[in-house]
Amino acid sequence: MSKVEIYTQPGCPYCIRAISLLQAKNVPFEEIHAPRGSAERETARERSGGGTTVPQIFIDGKSIGGCSELMQLEQDGQLDALLGHR
């Protein structure tokens, strides 16, 4: 199974939606709280190549973007392969 990390901010509806999808797929993930102005938020920005919004999602260390990109991967049938699901 792939390693999934998700940088989030409290009360963010997109973060909640992305987490809900991962939980529905029974995917273990590390949630990293990254409120605006925090060192964690800066780390997310650097790792993602400049992404300033949350969530920022990484699968096996690779940035896949945010909630919209996660949902698009699911819709296109590509998410399970990235997650190591069969």
Image: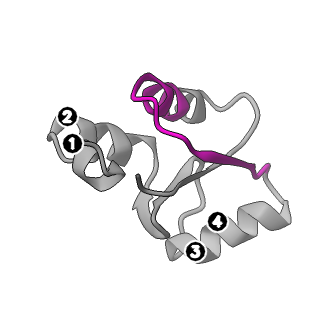
Q: Is mark 2 on a helix, strand or loop?
A: helix
Give the image location of residue 2, x and y in percent: 42, 56
Q: Name the residue under label 3.
A: 47
Give the image location of residue 48, x and y in percent: 52, 70
Q: Mark 1 points at which residue?
A: 86
Residue at 84% across, 60% down: 38
* Highlighted range, magenta: 17-35
Question: Which callout, 3 or 1, points at the residue further toward the start of the chain?
Answer: 3
Left or right: 79 in relation to 15: left
Left or right: 17 in relation to 1: right
Residue at 54% across, 32% down: 19
Q: Disc 1 versus disc 4: distance between alpha carbons?
A: 29 Å
Amino acid type indicated by mark 4 = Ala
Q: Disc 2 versus disc 1: distance between alpha carbons?
A: 16 Å
Q: Which one is closest to the eye, mark 1 or mark 4?
A: 1
Give the image location of residue 28, x and y in percent: 54, 41
Amino acid type indicated by mark 3 = Arg
Q: Which one is closest to the eye, mark 3 or mark 1?
A: 1
Give the image location of residue 24, x and y in percent: 43, 22
For the residues bearing labels 2 and 4, Cβ distance under 8 angstroms: no
Q: In this view, does 62 lie above or below 4?
A: below
Q: Disc 3 versus disc 4: distance between alpha carbons?
A: 5 Å
Q: Disc 2 versus disc 4: distance between alpha carbons?
A: 25 Å
Q: Dot 2: few (<14), some (14–19), or many (≥20) neighbours within 10 Å?
A: few
Image quarter of residue 47: bottom right
Question: Which callout, 2 or 4, points at the residue further toward the start of the chain?
Answer: 4
Magenta stretch containing residue 19, yes or no? Answer: yes
Amino acid type indicated by mark 2 = Gln
Q: Name the residue under label 2.
A: 75
Residue at 57% across, 47% down: 55
Q: Name the residue under label 4.
A: 44
User: In this orientation, which residue lies closer to the viewer: 60 or 63?
Assistant: 60
